[in-house]
Image: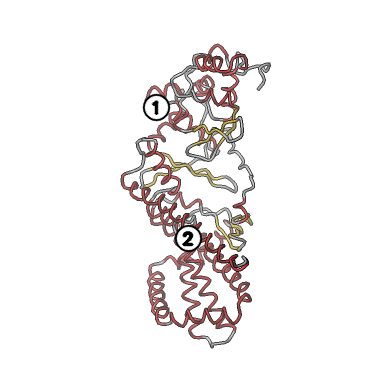
Amino acid sequence: MNSEEKSTLNIAECQNWLCPNFATYWQLISLIESDKVQLQAIKTKHSYLFSATEGYALQHFTGKFTVRQVQEKCKQQFGDAISPNFMVQLLEKLIKLGIFANPSLAKAQGENSRSRLLKSAVQWIWHTDGYWLLRLQNTDTIAYMQVSNYDKNLILQLNQQPVETIVAKYKISPQHLQELLRSLAIKGMLEGIEPPKPQKKFSILQLLFFKFRLFNPDNWLNRNINKFRFIFTTEFCFLLCIFLGFTTVIAFSKQEKIYHLGQELWSSQGYSLILPFALLMMLVVSIHELGHAFTLKHYKGVVLEIGMMFICLLPGAYTNTTDAYGLVKRRQRTLVMAAGVICQVVIWGIALCLWSISIPGSWFYTGTYLLMIAAQFTLALNLNPLNKFDGYYLVEAMTGINHLRKRSFAYYAQLWRKEPSQERNEDIGILAVYAPACLLYIIWLLINLFFWIWHLYTPFFPAK
């Protein structure tokens, strides 16, 4: 903003505003080989660029200095390069980006008791794990936001009282209230505010994993769910357990034959097996995703998206089961997340039985064997809780710890900053274990990748 531009703030009024403490939610990062600084959110992925002079001013947003005092410090540091309205322009920039709220505007909005802060479509859902969920369903998307009982009371008060009154009454920091409003705005839960469109930035990781939406399956699932309700009965579950126990016994009795057949097929047919194996993997993953979708629909959830995904260029299907977060019972959420894995185990068992009774050497013999291995391979991949696949979300559902990975690393960040943890005592043990396990897993992957590449290219290096 140029100094000649007219300010939208009351210059005289804002001189006595106290600059908020950004350290709770933001950190300043100096960029290498650049005169700019980056303001990075601690709890989200949002980041913004500022000039060096603006970065110097933001260093004094500690909750101790007024706007006038920071203006004077910047003037002492940079001299005539600082305009008389430098801090006012910086505040306007922060307000425009949604980082800082205009106290005057917030007060005016709070005093208007007829204004409704939350959209009328927002639902409150109480979870027995001790938190509230705000749920907002649009035409093609569902948004959730998790808040504590304390924050719920603050949000409800925002419809009735001015911001300043709430801050004084509950003795909270204005920054906490601002972050709460900002989170609601990002989710599109506030009246008159639509959620920001995600920024499409190319990353090399997109070559390893990317997906695109195909269609909204909810109406189709509604029409067909009654055909599959028998799957969720106690009698069917009992018969399924007997079947899986029987197939497990068969697998152990034939494990040597299964292993040797795999070696024989690879040595005799080699790369010609890759295409049918990939197609069978697609079939397994597609049925897996339908298992998630029908289980969520059985519990009255909404499934708004089915699409295609590619992992290391291997195709498969995916289902958006975000609405599982809205299921109150932990058992129901766990079953939604486990449904895909159960489908894979059933496919594995059926393929094993068919392979056991088929004629050796026939195409059916080879096909059922490949189907069994495809189910087994995708099952092992999905059950790893250190990848963000079913194993990870299953652990979240079983423990009731949403956003497990982010909260685990945030827990260690709080320890590093010597801040008190807001996590429940029963969750701290899981959070303390998960982050180190992730780091060790990543190190293990990188070491194995290095040795794989080394062995792959070593034959091409001339021997001394």
Colour scheme shown: secondary structure
- In the rendered view, would you say 262 is above or below 444? below
- In the rendered view, would you say 181 is above or below 343? above
Viewer-side residue, 445 vs 368: 445
Check disc 1 and give the amino acid type. Ile
Q: Residue at x 54, y 82 (%)?
A: 264
Checking the image for residue 172, the label placed there is 1
Viewer-side residue, 249 vs 189: 249
Left or right relative to 463: residue 22: left
Q: Position of residue 315 (x, y in %)?
A: 61, 63
Measure the C-alpha gap from mark 1 to mark 2.
42 Å
Left or right relative to 270: residue 128: left
Check disc 2 and give the amino acid type. Thr
Q: Position of residue 240 (x, y in %)?
A: 41, 72
* Quarter of image, res 153: top left
Q: Position of residue 147 (x, y in %)?
A: 42, 39
Q: Quadrant of the C terminus?
A: bottom right
Q: Which residue is mark 2?
A: 295
